[in-house]
Each structure stands twice: as structure tokens, then as C-alpha cells.
Image: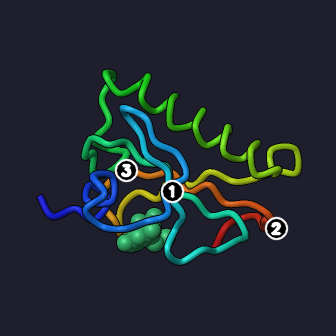
Amino acid sequence: MDCIFCRIAKKEIPSKIVYEDDVAVAFEDVNPQAPTHVLVIPRRHIPTILDLTQEDDALVGQLYRIAGKLARQRGIGDRGFRLVANCNREAGQTVFHLHLHLIGGRPMHWPPG
Ligand code: DGP
């Protein structure tokens, strides 16, 4: 399967990995939108939020906890940060491997564009 995030998780494509365990990997976004912009992904290929099943409930919790841990490590836990998961075209999803954007280190606007 030719998925760029699967290849990043397998280290076939270089990236700045900031966290990894058996089920998840986090790495710096190649096109950062804020001082902190990290992508947290499952190792397993799940294309979109719509492909999650009940069996993935624990995995989704893990992705959130990893993002929170990274936010704390970067000193943006108390200041605030945003977790974004784009789903499908109108939301701007461009890579069809589930990912959380951890974005922070600057004030965020609402609603998002
Ligand atoms: P989304 O638009 O939600 O599908 O976000 C995809 C993000 O992935 C986007 O912010 C740019 C990032 N990205 C795409 N290709 C690569 C890559 O090869 N390496 C890294 N580190 N990030 C990538």
C-alpha cells in the first residue's frame, strides 16, 4: 500500500519522529502552521474517522493521551493547544491515514477557517 504515513511509521521515509510506541507514532508536520505542529497517527492504516470501529476506541484514547503528553512536554499544556482531525475533502484532509494535528504555541482563532 502506498500510504505516505504508513511509510513514515515504518521509517521508509524520513521524518522528525518525536514519539513512538507499539501502536502510534508522532512526528513533526512538514508544513507547520504554528510553533508546535505535530501529527499523531496510529501505526495501523485507518483512512478516515469514518473507518473507526468500536475496537478502535482504546486506540483513539491513546492518540489523545499521546497528544496531551507531547503538549505538556512542549510547555503548551497550560497555555492551550488544539487537536484537529480533518475528515474528507471539504475539511481539507489530504493524507488518508488517520491523524491528529497537535497545534499550539500561538493564539488560536475560532471558528477555524
Ligand atoms: P491533512 O490536511 O489533515 O490531511 O494533513 C496532512 C498533513 O500532513 C499536512 O499538514 C502536511 C503533512 N504532511 C504531508 N506529507 C508529509 C510528509 O511527507 N512528511 C510530514 N512530516 N508531514 C507531511
Neighbour tally class for label 2: few under 14, some 14-19, many 20 plus, Cα within 10 Å: some
Pinpoint residue 7: horizontal percent, then vertical percent: 25, 59
Cα distance in 3D space between marks 2 and 1 = 17 Å
Find disc 1 in the rendering and name its residue: 39
Amino acid under label 2? Arg
Amino acid at circle 3: Leu
**Secondary element at image label 2:** loop
Is mark 1 in CB contact (under 8 Å) with mark 3? Answer: no
Q: CA distance from mark 1 to mark 3?
A: 10 Å
Disc 2 versus disc 3: distance between alpha carbons? 25 Å
Residue at 55% from the left image edge and 52% from the top image edge: 18
- Label 2 beta carbon within 8 A of ligand 1: no
Q: Is mark 1 within 8 Å of ligand 1?
A: yes
In the rendered image, residue 45, in percent from the top left (x then y), is placed at 25, 46
Please identify the residue farthest to the left as the structure is shown: 1
Tell me the residue at 79%/63% (across/down).
Answer: 105
Foreground mark, 1 or 3, reads: 1
| Extreme-bottom residue of the structure | 31
Q: Which residue is mark 3?
A: 98
Q: Which residue is mark 2?
A: 106
Dot 1 amino acid type: Leu
The residue drawn where x is 32% and y is 43% is 43
